[in-house]
Every structure is written in structure tokens, then in C-alpha cells.
Amino acid sequence: MTALRISRLRHWARIVADLSIWPLAIAVAASAVVERAVWPALAVALFQIAARWLAQGSPFNRTRADKAILGLALMSGVSLAITARMDLTAPQVARLILGMALYYAVVDWARTPGRLQLLYLGFVATGLLLALGALVSVDNVNFSFLPSNLVGLSQRLVGDGVNPNVMSGYLAILLPIIVGPVLFAWRELKPHLWLLLLLTVVAMPPVLLLLQSRAGIAAAILGLAMLCALRWRWILRIGLLTGSFLLLSLDLSAWQSAIEMFSRGGALGGLAEREELWSRAWYMIQDFFFTGVGMGLFGVVTDLLYPLFLAPPGVLFHAHNLFLQVAVDLGVPGLIAYLFTLGFVITMAVRTYVELGSTNASLRGMAAGIVASQVVLVAHGMFDAVTWGMVRPAVLVWAIWGVAAALWQLTETARSAEER
């Protein structure tokens, strides 16, 4: 009788864990809009973890990135322990833990191709909403074609606007994921998806151009080029030849001019300001090698210990480089954990892309899109750090990583079944 009750309890816990993905998705979306919503979202995530633990006897489904993610979690705990400003560090640590919880929630829930297709639909809808939302939420961009009462709507409703570099970074990361299945399996897409896809693909690139973020536009082009190279191998050969030609033909001054162009934007006037900022991040990494300065404290510590000469105090809050920022926040051990997490995600996506072959073109296109999106993440991360914890939409990266792990698990399960 006891065993029967435990079985029924686990059955209902599994149902609750599956259904709670929807409240979690809503809570995460709310946390990307309103700062204080991160705490209710974290509570929903912990409830989902508890239900999953009761249902299957383990809080997480195993993935290749588990140990690296554990390293990030441990270093975020260190960040809480050493911070001098809990009010700045705690929300960012909460957002990082929320991202990890979302990663495992996606891995647990997306156990079938049908559910992965629903997640793809979610990415499409998110891309469209971000593109349309950018028109009423982004600061310091003149959308003169909009009615005047729509301009600044986000500030009036939420209390703050969105930096154009932040918005362009996330549009650039989502674009290859949305386009991937279209390139690989356009004949298999259901008719009701085409209108949404058409609206999204038509809306995102123009908005990305209107935001005038050079790094975002360049990263998006690089990601789409990578996606096309994965779809058509001859493009990869041409890209390698073109890249080799550029490396050999352009002199140092040309490369410096290109870097100078991408360095301008936002609070930074050019490469000199960016180099000064990067040097301050490097000083922090040397002085706080093992622990970092604490998440969210880059601007405070810079003004206090490493003042800038080319920018006024209280203006720059992050290192404008993804990898430097992770090391500043969590120390070099945290950076190593982050790099391993990113490497495992790319490995899982590439392995899925290779193993699926021609068996499921739609899922293969999604895997290729994720590979290309990680190229965008790295390329954009050289000049900005908006995909890390200091901005509210950072959890979106963890959702993408979760889909990569879910795709990998699905292909591994199918391969194991074939071998038996």
C-alpha cells in the first residue's frame, strides 16, 4: 500500500512538474521586464525543482555541462560571501541561479520532438516581441515613424528603458535560431507557423539595423553566415578562403580602424575608452584572482580603486567584454566554469547537428541555429557583456543552452535505442 501511494505521489508530482513549466516561463518573462520580479520567478523555479525531485528522485536530469554549471553556482555563492554591496550582488546571483534552474527545467520538459517544436515557437514569438518592444522601450534611438505617444512607453510603464546594445545583442542571438529550421526544413514547417515566421523575419533585421549597434549587426551577420555555412558546405569553403585573404591582405592600421569602428557606441566614444575600461577589468582580475569583486560591483570598484580618466564616474557599470566581466564577477575559477559550460553547450549542439543527419531536418536546423547563436554570443561578447547577469534578459541565454542539452539528450536516447 505504501509503495502504491509513493507511486501515485510521484505520478502527480510529474504532472505538476510538467505543468509548472508554464508558470515558470511567465515568471521568467516578467523578471526580464521588471527587476523585482526575479524573486517570485526564483520561487517558482525552486517549486518546479522540488516537484521534479519528488517525481524522479533527482532534482536534475544529467547533461554534459553539469560540473561546469556546479562550478558557476559555487562561485556565485562565493560572490555573495565576499560582496560589500549585497543590494547589488544578490539580484544578479538570483538571476544567475534562475537561469540555471530554467536550463534544467527546459532539459526535463523538452523530452519529445513535439515539445522542442513548441520551444522553437517560443523563440520565434520572443524574437517578434523583442523586435516590436524595441520600438517603444529602447533609449536614445529616434524612431521618427512612430506616433509620439508611443515613444518612451516603457519608461512610463516600467520605469526604465532598454539600452540599444542590450536589445541588439539579444536580437542577434535569437536570429540564427529562428532562421535555422527555415533553412533546413522549410517544407516541413506547418502552415500556421509561416505567418508568425514571416512577421518575425521581416521585423527583426530592420529593427536590428535601426538600433545602430555596430557590434550587434556584425555579430548577427557572422552568425547568419555560420548558419549558411552549416547548411551549404560550399559557403564554408568560400568563407574560409575569404577570411584567409582578409587576414593576409589587410594591414595593422586597417584592423585597428575596424576595431575602432566597433568600439564606438553607448557610453564609450572609441577604442581608447574601451582599452582603458578593459585595463581596469584586468587589474581587478589580478587583484581578486580567486573570488572576483562580487557580481554587480564592477562600476563601484572601478570608481573606488581604479578610477577612469576618459569617462566620468558612475557611468560605466560593466567591462564591455563578456569574458572579462565573468572573471571580474566570479574570479578566474568562475571564468573557467563559464568557458567549460559554453564549450559543453557548443559540443552538444554540434554533436546533435552531426548525428541527426537527414533524419530530422527541423531539429537539425534548430541545432545548427544554436551553434550559430553561440558564435554570435562570443563575437558580440568581445565588445559587450549584455548576455551576462547584469541585464534582466540574461536568462534567455540559459533557455537556449537548455534547448541545446535537450536536443543532445533526445539524439543520445534515440541512438541508444537503435544500438539495443
Image (cartoon, rainbow, N blue to C red):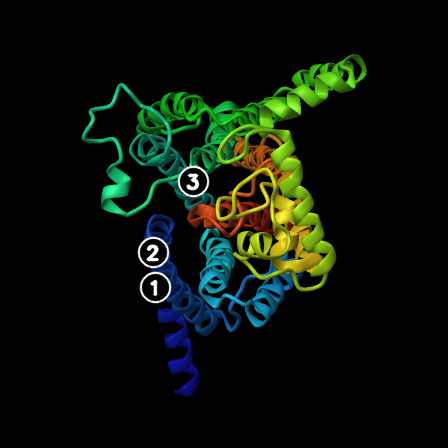
Q: Is residue 163 left or right of residue 401?
A: left
Q: Circle 3 is placed at which residue position? A: 117
Residue type at mark 2: give it. Answer: Ala
**Residue 105 placed where, x, y %?**
46, 58
Q: Circle 2 is placed at which residue position? A: 27
CA distance for labels 3 and 1: 27 Å
Task: Name the residue: 54% across, 48% down.
Answer: 388
Q: Circle 1 is placed at which residue position? A: 40
Q: In this view, does 249 lie above or below 105?
A: above
Which image quadrant for residue 244? top right
Nearer the observer: mark 2 or 3; the answer is 2
Asked whether residue 336 is in view, the answer is no
Q: Is residue 204 above or below residue 235?
A: below
> Which one is in front, 39 or 330?
330
Q: Are marks 2 and 1 in contact (CB under 8 Å)?
A: yes
Compare marks 2 and 1 and give the one earlier in the sequence.
2
Secondary structure state at the residue bearing disc 3: helix
**Residue 33 placed where, x, y %?**
34, 48
**Residue 324 placed where, x, y %?**
65, 47
CA distance for labels 2 and 1: 7 Å
Q: Is residue 199 left or right of residue 214?
A: left
Asked whether residue 337 is in view, the answer is yes
Compare marks 2 and 3 and give the one earlier in the sequence.
2
At label 1, counting other C-alpha atoms closer than 10 Å, the crowd grade (few under 14, some 14-19, many 20 or more) is some
Compare marks 3 and 1 and give the one earlier in the sequence.
1
Q: In this view, does 337 lie above or below 120?
A: below
Task: Name the residue: 44% across, 65% down.
Answer: 87
